[in-house]
Amino acid sequence: MSESSQQIPDIPPFNPEAPHMQKPRLRPVQGFPVQHQGQQFLGLRDPSMLSERVVFTSPAATQLLPLMDGSRTIEEIVSEVGHGLTVEMMQGIVAQLDGAMLLEGPSFDAHLQKLKDEFNASEILPPAGTATLVEMLELNARRQAYIARKQEEGEIFNPQDVMQVPPEELQSIEVDPPDELLRRQLDNWMTKALEQADDPSFDDLPRAVVVPHLDYPRGWPNYAAAYGRMRVVDRPDRVIILGTNHHGQGTGVVGCSKGFETPLGVCAADKDALDFLQKKLDETEAGLGEKLLEHEFDHEREHSIELQVAWIQHIFGKDDSGEYPRIISLLCHDISRTQDGESYDGKGVGLVPVVDALRQLIETLPGKTLVVASADLSHIGPQFGDQKQVDENWRNEIAKTDREMLELLVEKKPEQLVSSMAWQQNPTRWCSIGNLVAAAQIVQPEEVRILSYGAAADPQGMGCVTSCAMVMV
C-alpha cells in the first residue's frame, strides 16, 4: 500500500502490542480505481468522510480486505491469502489503514471523539461542498488571469499549458472574492438551464421543490431548473430541508439544532420551529422529541443539507435585519426498508409523526414555509456494487424506470412509490425515498410537475447517478 503525502503525512508504525492491530477490523470503506503512471491502483476511503484520508494499494488487496473482520490474526490472514503475502507486508498494510482511521480501534475512537467535541462546541456547521466548489472557481479564475497576463506580455503561450502550472505559483494572482465567484457561477448555471424553458419562473412560492444533492458540477442542471424559477417569487420565512442520511448512525429521522455556513454567509437554525417540532413529537405516545437530536452528529459530514443552503441564500437573499431565511434540517431514512415509515430498529424517530408535526408547524407558525427535498435517485454501476459497467442502453432503461416511479409522485401517490420500491427491493438504489415521500405528505400538493431529469455518468462506465427537479404546488 501507499498513501497520499498530502493526506497522510505521518504513518504510525505497526504496534505488535495493540490488540486492534493484531486482529484488525476494517471500518466500512469505499474502493475506487486509480491509474498512476500507467499502473492500476485501488483507492480506499471512508464513505462517511469522518476520515478524509485515502490509502492506495494493489487491486489484489480485495482478497484480504474481507478477512479483516476482527476475528483473524495477521498471521491467519497471511496464511489464508497466500500468494506471496508476508506478515511484514500485512503489518504495513494494517499500520497504514490505522493511520488513515480506517480501522476500528483507539486511533479512530480518539479521532471521532475530537470531531464530536468540535461539533458540539459550534452553533454553525462550516462549509464543505460549497467550499470545494469555490476553491475550484478560484483556481479556474487564477488560471484565466495567468493566461491573460501571458498574452498581454506578448509571450507565446499555449492556454492548455496552464493546467501544468503548479497551483502555488498561481496563489499570488488576485481574483474576485469567493462570494462573488459563487454567485456568478450560480447565475450562469440558472441562465443556461432556463434559457430555452417555456416557463422560466414560478408564479408564486411553491409548497415544495425536489432538487439533487449531487455535487454541483454534476448536478447543476437540476438544481438550477428548480431554484432558478424562484428568483422572483415571495421570500420564505423558513425553509425545511429534508436530506438523506447516507452514512450516519441514526435509524430514523435525525434533526439538527445548528445553522449552516457557506461562502455566502450563514443560514441560522430556526430554533422556534425546532422547539415546536420537538414539542409535537413529545406529545406522541413514544415521546420522540428528545430522540430527534439523539444522533445530531450525523449532520457533521452529510452533504445533502449544505448543498441546498448556498442556493437558498443566493435566491432569497437577506431580510431587513440582515438574515437569510432560517432553516430546519432533517435527515430521512429509507422508508422502503421499513413498515409504515418506522425507524430501522423501532427505536428512532419514524417518518409519520415527523410529517404530522411539520404539517402542523406550517399551519401554525406565522410566515411562509418552503419545503426542499434534497434527493438523488438511482445509483448504478460497479462503483455501487453492480457487476457490469454502465452503457447507453442501461442508462436509457434506468431513465424509463425512474420516470415511472416519479410519475407516482406526479399522480400524488407517494405511498404507492414506497410499496413499489419495497416490493422491488429498491433495485437501483434510490437513496432519497424517505425525503421525497415526506415532502409530498407534508405539503399535500394540488399539483406535482417534473421540471427536469438527468444522469451523471463517468466516462469509464463505473458509476451513474440520476436526479431530477420537481415542483409541488
Image (cartoon, grey):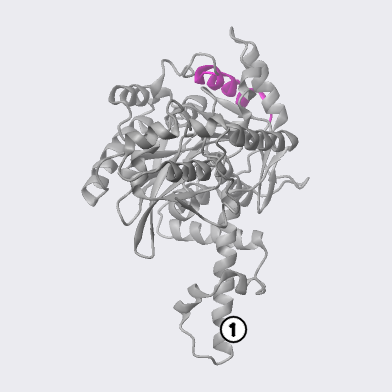
Q: Main secondary structure of the magenta part?
A: helix
Please state which of residues 165 and 141 is positioned toward the viewer in this rendering: 165
Name the side, left or right, on which 155 lies relative to 361: left
Q: Which residues are magenta?
A: 349-366
Extreme right residue here?
321
Q: Is residue 360 magenta?
A: yes
Picture residue at 35% right of the left edge, 48% below the top: 59
Under circle 1, the secondary element is: helix
Q: Is residue 58 above or below residue 361?
A: below
Q: Position of residue 349 (x, y in %)?
A: 55, 19
Please state which of residues 401 and 7 is positioned toward the viewer in this rendering: 7
* Occupied quadrant, residue 360: top right
Q: Is residue 461 above or below residue 339?
A: below
Q: Is residue 423 magenta?
A: no
Q: Amino acid at mark 1?
A: Arg
Q: Position of residue 3 (x, y in %)?
A: 50, 53
Do we see residue 200 in this rendering?
no
Please state which of residues 369 and 65 is positioned toward the viewer in this rendering: 65
